[in-house]
Image: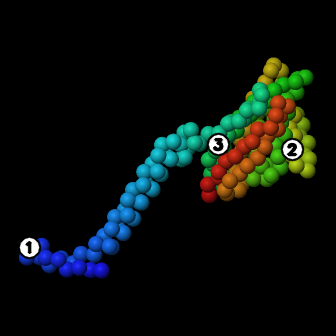
């Protein structure tokens, strides 16, 4: 409700209820901007602790981006245990349907597709083998998958921006 008040010789209309609502909206806006700034500083826009994910199972590990862009290149780094001059990893097909592997270094010696996962076998020497994968996401939203190795299963979860 508008109230007319006199301040000296001036007649000023004031709506205190509207002014309180406007101040609440303004405070909410400041809080949203503050939280967005904190998220950006923590890496939500790339290059920080929120931007990179990793997982381990025994001697096997994977490093991947938690935040990616649709069809933009991204890199995954997988370390696999070697047994009998061979290392292998199996990636679930749901993940492969949402993330396209463009290139792998080193290249797998063989690949076997199954109903639930694709198994990639590599030759190697030593205790572990590091595989560098260049990929791109072809699905927007949350993308989850599993990477199985001789040492266990490693979950992968990322969010893909449009």
| Mark-to-mark CA distance, 1 and 3 | 63 Å
Query: Residue 19 location in percent, x, y?
Result: 31, 70
Query: Residue 126 location in percent, x, y?
Result: 81, 19
Where disc 3 sits, the SS reads: strand
Query: Residue 62 location in percent, x, y?
Result: 72, 35
Query: Residue 88 location in percent, x, y?
Result: 85, 33
Q: Dot 3, how many residues are within 10 Å of its Cα: few (below 14), some (14-19), or many (20+)?
A: many
Residue 87 visible from this viewpoint = yes
Query: In the image, is residue 13 above or below residue 161?
Result: below
Reading the image, the residue beneath label 3 is: 65
Between residue 124 and residue 117, name the one nearer to us: 117
Name the quadrant containing residue 132.
Answer: top right
Nearer the N terminus, badge 1 or badge 3? 1
| Mark-to-mark CA distance, 2 and 3 | 21 Å
Q: Which mark is residue 118?
A: 2
Q: Dot 2, how many residues are within 10 Å of its Cα: few (below 14), some (14-19), or many (20+)?
A: some
Q: Which colouring convention does the figure follow?
A: rainbow
Where disc 1 sits, the SS reads: loop
Reading the image, the residue beneath label 1 is: 8
- In the image: residue 10, left or right of residue 68: left
Residue 73 visible from this viewpoint = no
Query: In the image, is residue 9 above or below residue 122?
Result: below
């Amino acid at each position: 409700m508008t109230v007319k008040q006199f301040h000296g010789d001036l007649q000023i209309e004031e709506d205190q209820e509207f002014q309180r609502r406007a101040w609440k909206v303004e405070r909410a806006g400041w809080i949203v901007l503050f939280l967005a700034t904190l998220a950006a500083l923590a890496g939500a826009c790339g290059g920080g602790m929120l931007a990179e994910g990793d997982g381990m199972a025994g001697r096997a590990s994977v490093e991947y981006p938690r935040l990616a862009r649709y069809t933009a290149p991204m890199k995954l780094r997988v370390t696999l245990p070697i047994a009998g001059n061979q290392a292998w990893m199996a990636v679930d097909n749901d993940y492969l349907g949402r993330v396209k592997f463009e290139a792998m270094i080193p290249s797998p010696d063989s690949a076997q597709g199954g109903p639930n996962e694709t198994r990639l076998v590599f030759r190697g020497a030593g205790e572990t083998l590091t595989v560098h994968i260049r990929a791109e996401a072809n699905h927007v939203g949350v993308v989850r998958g599993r990477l199985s190795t001789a040492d266990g299963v490693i979950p992968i979860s990322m969010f893909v921006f449009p």
